[in-house]
Amino acid sequence: FRRTRSLNAPSPIQQFGPCGRIMKNSAMVMTIQDPASQRLTWYKPPLTVLVIKKVRDAAVLQPFVQLVTWLIEEKRMVVFVEQAVLEEASLQASADFCTLRDRLMTFRDGKDDLTDKIDFIICLGGDGTLLYASQLFQQSVPPVMAFHLGSLGFLTPFEFDNFQEQVTNVLEGHAALTLRSRLRCMIMRKNDGNNVSVGVGKAALNSPIKPPSTFLVLNEVVIDRGPSPYLSNIDLFLDGKHITSVQGDGLIVSTPTGSTAYAVAAGASMIHPNVPAIMVTPICPHSLSFRPIVVPAGVELKISVSPDSRNTSWVSFDGRNRQELFHGDSLRVTTSVYPVPSICAQDQISDWFDSLAECLHWNVRKRQKHLD
Amino acid sequence: FRRTRSLNAPSPIQQFGPCGRIMKNSAMVMTIQDPASQRLTWYKPPLTVLVIKKVRDAAVLQPFVQLVTWLIEEKRMVVFVEQAVLEEASLQASADFCTLRDRLMTFRDGKDDLTDKIDFIICLGGDGTLLYASQLFQQSVPPVMAFHLGSLGFLTPFEFDNFQEQVTNVLEGHAALTLRSRLRCMIMRKNDGNNVSVGVGKAALNSPIKPPSTFLVLNEVVIDRGPSPYLSNIDLFLDGKHITSVQGDGLIVSTPTGSTAYAVAAGASMIHPNVPAIMVTPICPHSLSFRPIVVPAGVELKISVSPDSRNTSWVSFDGRNRQELFHGDSLRVTTSVYPVPSICAQDQISDWFDSLAECLHWNVRKRQKHLD
Amino acid sequence: FRRTRSLNAPSPIQQFGPCGRIMKNSAMVMTIQDPASQRLTWYKPPLTVLVIKKVRDAAVLQPFVQLVTWLIEEKRMVVFVEQAVLEEASLQASADFCTLRDRLMTFRDGKDDLTDKIDFIICLGGDGTLLYASQLFQQSVPPVMAFHLGSLGFLTPFEFDNFQEQVTNVLEGHAALTLRSRLRCMIMRKNDGNNVSVGVGKAALNSPIKPPSTFLVLNEVVIDRGPSPYLSNIDLFLDGKHITSVQGDGLIVSTPTGSTAYAVAAGASMIHPNVPAIMVTPICPHSLSFRPIVVPAGVELKISVSPDSRNTSWVSFDGRNRQELFHGDSLRVTTSVYPVPSICAQDQISDWFDSLAECLHWNVRKRQKHLD
Amino acid sequence: FRRTRSLNAPSPIQQFGPCGRIMKNSAMVMTIQDPASQRLTWYKPPLTVLVIKKVRDAAVLQPFVQLVTWLIEEKRMVVFVEQAVLEEASLQASADFCTLRDRLMTFRDGKDDLTDKIDFIICLGGDGTLLYASQLFQQSVPPVMAFHLGSLGFLTPFEFDNFQEQVTNVLEGHAALTLRSRLRCMIMRKNDGNNVSVGVGKAALNSPIKPPSTFLVLNEVVIDRGPSPYLSNIDLFLDGKHITSVQGDGLIVSTPTGSTAYAVAAGASMIHPNVPAIMVTPICPHSLSFRPIVVPAGVELKISVSPDSRNTSWVSFDGRNRQELFHGDSLRVTTSVYPVPSICAQDQISDWFDSLAECLHWNVRKRQKHLD
């Protein structure tokens, strides 16, 4: 019984009838492992752990102190936290935390480089913490274990109750792993010398530090009309071909992970994170027939303001770094080679369907009563 | 500049931070060629060609005779047609055809085996011809070149005008190839001895030839309530786990190819055929939150009538072989290893977007006029 | 402060600028009372009450016996039940019921005429009971009070707990009233003599009793493709004008009451029953742009099989009386002058929104957590 | 044969069974004429005509000059135009227009009062001109005749070709009339003394002229999150009762006329302008089950920022007068008694369906070909 694999081509078979073949193209051959079978292992034992906590949420404080204490004292790990966390008033008021404080390593977001310093990431508190972790690591991302403290999130599958047992389990390498693809987004400015990419608009030209020219998003990049009362007119290209023009509130380009975020609110179908795809969803399109589409991961999308559009557009990346897209500028989007390795609480399938039910009430309903 | 590929895992990179790795599982490793680069080649020159024409459409007659004559006389190919075609009254009335008649090879659908006899398939006339070709070849399918005669279809990208040039081109091996995945569907009957699969319901028990137990579909398998006035109650399992129950008119399990057929009418997003996925779309679900979902190709879906459902369900495969699904029966669906190799007129991307515009009027609209 | 009324024309004002007027047309003038203010009153005290109970539901038995006993003994009312109810095995097994039995009036559905015999209707058990009541009274309908026994229904707003107090209250005339409009549907047969309407297809021509030629529906009339695997092609006319053709699984013409039934599953918006409108919703239309529409109550819709359609259609009325619609036949639909006067548990607005939340989980969701 | 009317209550019948009645409430009784029969007449011959032309559209210039010349010279009418029109450079360059100039009456938008000065309005050029006309007349609106110059609009049904004949026809009183309901919107400010309504936010407090406190909209009032990256949390009340809370990009409250504007892009069904209703449509709601709803005209909606919302909202009226809605403020919306009397080119039904097809491509599609 031959069976296809979850992430591969429709078929590993290369022969069609007695004579037909796929033309060999060795540059395009790759060896991959079926993602459905992906599990985490450690090349060497993880020593450094970055703990990210939800900001301004009192409910996270106690678990945070508990977790960090345990990681340092029981697991003898080196714990990193963001500098700003130490300055939170509510934490400073915690007696338990004061003794802990000096044993923490800190970094400043946007100033210190974490590349190759972090072996493992633990998130506490909400989907936003994972988006933040994604944004900290613009290249390779260490494995992430994410706890929800209130109700289950799409990106935070673990319950905190018996965290010791669960973290120990993961540190020993027993866990399914979902590689959540990210989108690499580059803004090409018209007026920018040789049309190289820069990350921000006019406002930033005088800023001393050159901002990043590229953004990796875990959920989506959104192009909208911003504060303009008029519809956006946006041109969409795919691998260099003009595909369509968008007239409406805007356009969402999302990962499968992001398909259950803003895209689903705009009418998209929901895509399991193991599907190698990019979702393109219009926001309130003027055309009744503008249904969302799903294209293969790895294509390159180009988005620009239509030449005859009366106004510009605005771009934001996972809800951040909002900036204007002017006539002549373009946004390039493709799948990044650096996914976020997100550790499953159960497995890739169960985690996803559990969060569909919990977060979106997917098909939760009253049953039609059965007759006797 | 490293780039991901259109059909592979989110990333070919297997390392996450300094310590994290994907655990090696050699049984799950595969070597594939990026489908975006797939082109047709011929291992040896194709000699036999099966020509499938739309039935009962007068507009197809003349092109059919033209094409077959040319294939035999110019290309010296052996042409197969279905026996029933020779019996069409309108063809028998054609003088051109009568001289041709004896030079054709014929087969009878459901009786003669075409395996390994056909090198190449040409379809004339509509998406239905490709569905028919798919159904003829339940295992390996020879490359298919499909002409539309009226307007462009999703599965029939070629125009007939200069067919000689275009067929010659393809026979020389110059063509992009879309491998359209199919779904392998098996019905497991409760009452059927050792629960082995059989292909049809009670009605067929007396038929002399045991019908096929497995159906390959190119578009979709549909489970609906049939003539019952009551809602269907259907249980859906994925890789053995109960995922949800469907209360409504039914459920569509479709390939990416089928996402633009019945599924789109039921509200699904549209998926490019290169995306390795299966789409699950409810038909008029009783629950407002039952949005369609996209799961990875290669999972196994199991569908059965809910034990407490007051009525049974009906199943059909690409609109054919309709049969009842009783309490205790189940339908298993997964991606087949035998896709349909569909030859592109332009390329995989352009062909798809052209047919979205032409067949579904996708985002075709009046533009908001620009102010001077 | 002048205010418009909930069901009237956009404005009671008939003058537009210094000179413009609405042309007087006394035949079209009517005097109505704003439905938002409609309350039930009794011209004389109601004496006869029809009790309709859900069939084959054990949970309804005890309440049914309780209610009927109380109506007879305490309220001295004459209670009608359907003959078939008395024959239910489970009721006959009830000792309480046996003493009651002889004091009940009975009628046989389809044989006895209830016109002018019933002052008041009580339904026990589910939305189906109200659909049944609607069908019993094809002209004027007595006021209906409907109890749900499990969870709240769209048409069954009352809880049974303190039924004595609630029924007493209604009998004293204290209750808001929702007039639920119905649709009057007539099938005109092509082959039928002078093209007068008859209620059933060919199959019934030999039946001794002429079936009713007109159906009143409370939820919807559905035209679909029946068992045919091909799409329906249906022509839709409004006040004699061809409006559009439907290609898809079918078409739903529903009342505002029915907008939350099948229509909502097919994608319609939900309409409060006080809005004088008819909703037209396609079922899985082939066209992406075929959005549901809402037209004024009182228009006349005509629906027929398109002359070039390859197959016929099927019609059903509130899920009953399913019959084939042949080429040349037509279905006429308009708002009936006989609504169902449905007694509110609270008021017209609260009852509706409560059932949206309870039955459809309308906008029930997890709130985004507030930051401290 | 008794028939209901298009805009009235579900039934003119007030009796239900032998005893049930609608309780008389003379304060709530009204006499109206069925809107389906509404035709324009003139109390006295119209003398003054306001001509509104689309701004900055060169294609409108020539028709504008033609029309105005004809109205003055042939029809001897007094023509009003906005002062700003006379100052358009392109008009000043027109020789024809210069001789006309002194014979025009002008007014300044926002300064001069047009009440009782205008008998008739002609719009030239696009749906925006009718929105503008609506905004000029915050109380009674003279009859409006609207010409499209490019393609048919929802609000501009007349073709310009033989305008002389058509205008003459209307001036003689031969025309069907659609009364397009408007919504009366009031903003109640928390900090504003005795909580009386004012029309604008903080920014305007120092402005010398008190802006209007009330806005009449012909399409819709939109409440959205403005530039905030966070979801809006908006509470919705109906006749004083809390109905639901909106979490998403925002909320659209629209007239039937507006149902084919922004609301349809956000997923609403389309409502014929003769239906007395208000449509409530969420914009990209976080909840999958938040379907649009249609409530009776004449209810009062109240919308406010949820007390626990982290950010404020923004309101705009037919796309204008955008302003912030703060915590504690509220927006009241109900149907106005002053509709826009919009003159039909054909009739109320044909005009609407023609614009659905032309503007929204409603159900325009490729037909499935019929078999011979």
Image (tube, coloured by chain):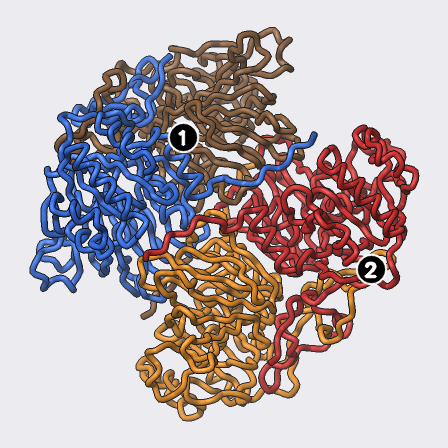
Chain colours: A orange, B red, C brown, D blue
Q: Residues within 10 Å of mark 1 (few under 14, many from 20)?
A: many
Tell me the SS state at disc 1. Answer: strand
Residue at the limit of the structure toward the front, as seen here: D95
Residue at the limit of the structure toward the right, as seen here: B102
Q: Which mark identifies residue B201?
A: none
Task: Please name the residue shown 40% across and 46% down the image.
Answer: D264
Residue D132 visible: yes
Separation (CA) of disc 1 from disc 2: 57 Å
Give A299 or B240, whichever is nearer the viewer. A299
Query: Which quadrant holds residue D277?
Result: top left
Q: Are marks 1 and 2 in contact (CB under 8 Å)?
A: no
- Amino acid type of disc 1? Ile
x and y, in percent, of residue A98 in the image: 37, 88
- Amino acid type of disc 2? Gly
Q: Which mark identifies residue C278?
A: 1
Please tell me whether mark 1 or mark 2 is closer to you in this view.
2
Tell me the SS state at disc 2. Answer: strand
What is the chain identity of the residue bearing mark 1?
A: C
Give D364 or D197, whichever is nearer the viewer. D364
Residue B231 visible: no
